[in-house]
Amino acid sequence: MTAFHSTRGGGPATLEAVLQTGTAPDGGLYVPERLAVFEREALAEAATPAELAERMLAPYFAGSSLAGALPDICRNAFGFPLPLVDLSPAGNGAGLRLLELFHGPTAAFKDYGARFLAACLERILADEPASSPPLTILVATSGDTGAAVASAFSGREKIRVVVLFPKGRISPRQEHHLGCWDDNVQALAVHGAFDDCQRLAKQAFADAALRKRVRLGSANSINLGRLLPQSAYHAWAALKSPEGTHFVVPTGNLGNGVACLWAREMGAGIGRILLTTNANRTIGDYLSSGEYLGRESIGTLANAMDVGDPSNMERLRHQFGGDVDRIRAAVSAASVDDGRIRRRIRREYSDSGAVLCPHTAAGVDACRGLLAESGAPAGDWVIAATAHPAKFETVVEPLIGTAVAPPPQLEELLSRPSSHEEIPAELDALTPFLD
């Protein structure tokens, strides 16, 4: 049985407790005592992404009440396509492929982790007495997380969801997707930036009096139940590529980046990892200077990455004992501003007809920029395509000069009525929606 500990030293905790609470009592984030390590050849025997996820995650579920349900949980979470699609080669001949992570119900990579976590929590709560209080999932979103969580938890028994999003800082379609769910989901537009939403959520979790009244849980990437399954799709792409293929991961709160790092540590055979951000340069500045300085986020075209103080930086630093030189050896980072994002969306469409969302465009631009430098690493690259471009039609369509048709699952969501409430960025304004 794997033990779980806080990044700040607390623990141990059971898997069930880790999934329900999200954060440790000391304010840290849960991590496995040690990562399971596999032979690449053994992982490659998996016939489907769901089977691979089951193999990779079984050590963390061993001895828990969820162990027997893990195959079904993985089939539910990975029940949609996970294609690798060729891009035009780089100038140095390196092969580039997109790992399309947007074929789930809300057309974003976060569908995988959110559905996995929802299935786990529903099974845990089903074993409790009928008189047990409901679990209230409080989630802050910079764009795609909220819709994925709302979709995954909508209509589930004994679970409520409260989604905080920054008013005016997400696309119209993203906003619609937050408020079109069953009655157990409440969307709240916060007057502020994503960092204000994240700060509100952290204040709620730290409020002892509130925690006594309300059973709070998290479905952001601070919850280990989000990160662990995300490592499986990176591993799947690595196993479908030559060993040592490098990965580019667009990232905001650093959950997807840490998940890719964990996939490499568990034996998937991943080469270099390039973390890509937008103009919010916190990660890259930390690797350059060695000093971590969280800051207010900047609004950008790639709004799901508008994070100035990434929560999962704590996991990244913990993994390497806070040694920035070891972190630099493990990952690198690049920042791509809005001008480069616009140019890359135009260029890829002009060159090959590929239509990219702003976040994916940031990853592609960072990768092509790196490969244009002298001394660029040899080998092929996989770039995580994090969301369907139709979710960002107001950005993408003017740049390519044509409409981007939403996939069927988004069309269905857009046909539903949607609503939300507005609140100031104050805990007193949030509390009535939690009580």
Image (cartoon, rainbow, N blue to C red):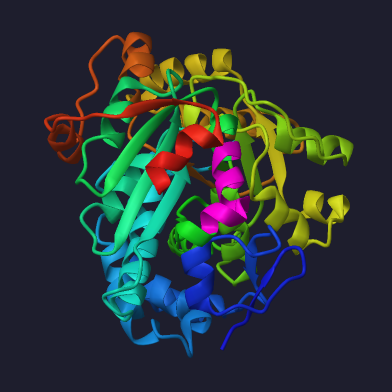
Q: Based on the picture, tell me whether residue 210 belongs to the magenta stretch.
A: yes
Seen from the viewer's position, the closer of residues 181 and 383 is 181
Residue 373 placement: quadrant: top right
Q: Considering the image in quadrants, where does the N terminus appear?
A: bottom right
At 66% from the left and 79% from the top, the residue drawn is 12
| 315 or 194: nearer the viewer | 194
Q: 47 or 411, which lies in front?
A: 411
Report the residue at 54% width, 61% height from top: 22
Query: In the picture shown, does residue 251 fall above or below 312?
Result: above
Specify the principal SS of the magenta part. helix
| Left/right of residue 266 with respect to residue 130 in the rendered view | right
- Above or below, comparing residue 268 to residue 400 in the picture: below
Relative horizontal placement of residue 84, taking residue 226 as reference (left or right): left
Count all numbered tags in the image, as a single digit: 0
Residue 96 relative to residue 254: left or right: left
* Residue 141 picture location, percent across and down: 46, 38
Q: Which residues are magenta?
A: 199-211
Residue 428, percent from left and from top: 52, 35
Give the quadrant of residue 153.
Answer: bottom left
Rendered view: 427 above or below 211? above
The location of residue 226, given as percent across then percent down, is 47, 59
**Residue at the (32%, 24%) spot, across then down:** 353
- The answer to whether residue 302 is above or below residue 329 is above
- The x, y position of residue 8, in whole percent, is 76, 63
Q: Is residue 317 magenta?
A: no
Determine whether, in the image, residue 24 is placed left or right of residue 352: right
Q: Residue at x 24, y 60 (%)?
A: 156
Residue 227 visible to the viewer:
no
Asked if residue 160 shows in the view, the reply is yes
